[in-house]
Image (spheres, rainbow, N blue to C red):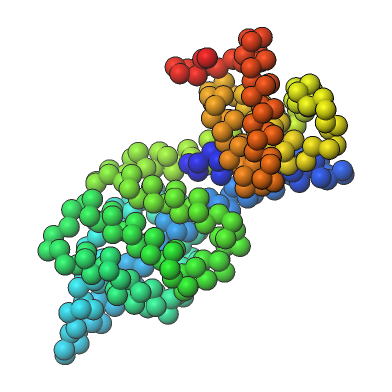
Amino acid sequence: MFNRRFLRIKVFQALYAFYQDDEGSRYTHEKTLLKSLDKSYDLFLFLLAFPTEFKFYISKELDIQTSKHFPVQNTIAPLQALMNNKAIALLEQNEFLTQRLKNIRSKWSNTEELYKNIFAEIRESETMVNYISQTEHSFADDKKILGEIFELLIGDSEYFNQFTEEQFLNWEDDQVTITITLLKTIQGLKENNLSDFIDKLNSGDDEDQKFMKDLYHLTIENDDELLKLIADKTKNWEADRIAMVDMLMMKMALCEILKFPHIPVKVSINEYLELAKLYSTPNSHGFINGVLDKIHLDLKKNNQIEKLGRGLVE
């Protein structure tokens, strides 16, 4: 469900911790790795539960506002628009999703003041003003406004971000990836049909977990082979002079090239070059690229790369 770069980062962090820990078991660090994935998944579900929980507040507030002697239309209009949002209704009415979110939804309890502040931010936004100016909304319109509300809250709302961080310590680290995943999920909703979405939700965590476990264990299990490939192309460098981060990035890239038949070679190399920009020195990108390119050419020449599927065989 999450993008592969996010998963690679988590595996990289686990492997770094493992290689730094002289006494720790690799299975101990594997547990930490999988727990971090669980926390990310819970955070995603927490955000996914927000629209339906917020709608409960909206319903009560709408009753209060419409029962006033002098109702304020500028307040009622956005409340009614959110109450009638078909994308939120689709999430709200699915029994499987309701059960999946059951344990997470409790985190949104006792948040009346938070919802009040959030609604004030949403109501005054240009996004909501434009939305309620339309007399009718299609399902696509409702999906769009829901995504824009999340972007507004995550990007600009101190109330929303502070509350989320209090619930999830990993919010700061996972925010970008979780937000992207959430927005893609919302845009992927189909009117009156949650089956595709539910299938992805149901299987996504298992697929992510398998990829992470395979990459983690295969990198460790093939350490000698991977290290030799790197050493043969860095003979002017002693292994301990190569930064551990750079060495680990190269090992992981080579592990994917050799042990993951469904991932294109170029994808693996490019992904770790991007990660090197985040975690290593400015000069590491060129160094890693040069070493991996030389190894790739040798592996290809000796027919040591086995890829399956159209477009993967070089």
Residue 304 image point, x, y percent: 65, 13
Residue visible at 44% across and 17% down in the picture: 310
- Taking the image as shown, residue 82 lies to the left or right of residue 310, namely left
Q: Residue drawn at (73%, 42%), measured in percent from left and top?
A: 245
Q: Position of residue 31 (x, y in %)?
A: 70, 45
Residue 101 in view in this figure:
no
Left or right of 309 on screen, residue 248: right
Residue lying at the far left in this picture: please name it. Answer: 135
Position of 186 relative to 292 (above/below): below
The residue nearer to you, when weighing 210 against 123, is 123
Number of numbered callouts drawn = 0
At horizontal 29% and vertical 78% (from top left) the residue drawn is 61
Q: Position of residue 50 (x, y in %)?
A: 40, 62
Tell me where residue 49 sits by quadrant.
bottom left
123 relative to 187, above or below: below
Q: Could you say which quadrant of the image residue 101 lies in?
A: bottom left
Q: Nearer the viewer, residue 24 or 21?
A: 21
The residue furthest bottom is 69
| Residue 172 x/y as whole percent | 57, 60
Q: Taking 206 as reference, is 141 left or right?
A: left
> In front: 59, or 118?
118
The residue lying at 38 percent from left, 65 percent from top is: 152
- Quarter of the rendering containing residue 34: top right
- On the question of residue 125 being in view, the answer is yes
Farthest residue, direction top: 302
